[in-house]
Amino acid sequence: MHLPSSALLRKLRPSLLPQTLRYPFPARACSRLLHTSIQSTPTQPSLGPFRGLTTSTHRSFPPPSNVPATTDRGPVSDEDTQTDFSSMNVLGNTPAPTTAIDACLSHGFHLGNGIKIAGGSGCLLIAGEAFGWTPWSAPGSGTPGKGPKSMVNAKGQWQAGEAAWGILEVVWPKPDLLILGLGPRMLPIAPETRRWINELGIRVDVQDTRNAAAQFNLLATERGAGEVAAALIPIGWREPRG
């Protein structure tokens, strides 16, 4: 069988190619497709323009980073224009308050002035003074009948009766902020407790005891012990099971 001429192929190419294969392939691929379709038989399927095509997978990798060979920065400069970061500590020369908390224990606290509060009692730090504090013994605290140290009401809220805050009523001037440390974990406080403290003109911040102690040390140093007060329960306190 003789192959058709090139002129005949150019005239037959638009009618022989399917609509989807007319334009995506170049002229050389279309000519190869016509040759293979004429020469192929029904028993020998042809791959058409895909014969001889190869696929390759290209993976892109990030360029290698230029790791310095050494971390040596050279000799120390003698210029006096270098920044002294230690002089940027604005509280570096400010003495900590005497009631700053040095350690939080499971049964009490150690203060910066050497006072140790033990026996499972909490502490109330206000106006530069430290007082032992047992809010669970105040009427209206916790859940009645649950236990002598109950501080959580039936709704899961930390609740202390008004008798637990008696010193806040008599102190003057009153602190601007009261930091509550509620033991090993933070709990929501009852709306009645928050409302009673806010009516005295004091804002309330609730945290666990460790974070409350750290915040008190910072704010009392920055703003003064008269502006910030703290009421802390030992980290070993546990709500009795009723």
Image (spheres, grey):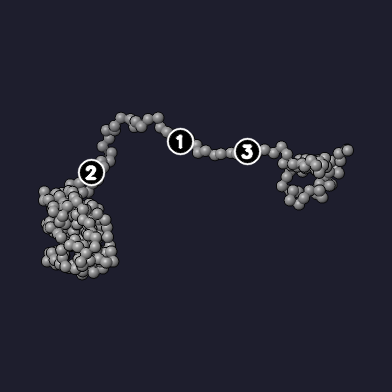
Mark 3: give few (<14), some (14-19) or many (20+) Cα within 10 Å: few
Specify the quadrant that holds the C terminus.
bottom left
Question: Which residue position holds label 3?
Answer: 56
> Alpha-carbon distance for marks 1 and 3?
27 Å
Q: Residue 110 location, x and y as percent?
A: 15, 50
Q: Which numbered marker is on residue 87?
A: 2
Q: Which numbered marker is on residue 65?
A: 1
Asked if the residue under mark 2 is in contact with the one under mark 1, i.e. CB atoms within 8 Å, the reply is no
Q: Residue 109 location, x and y as percent?
A: 16, 51
Q: Earlier in the sequence, mark 2 or mark 3?
A: 3
Rendered residue at 20%/46% (across/down): 92
Specify the quadrant that holds the N terminus.
top right
Tell whether 224 sits left or right of 75.
left
Tell whether 213 sits left or right of 129.
right
Rendered residue at 24%/45% (across/down): 88
- Tag 1: residue type? Ser
- Tag 2: residue type? Ser
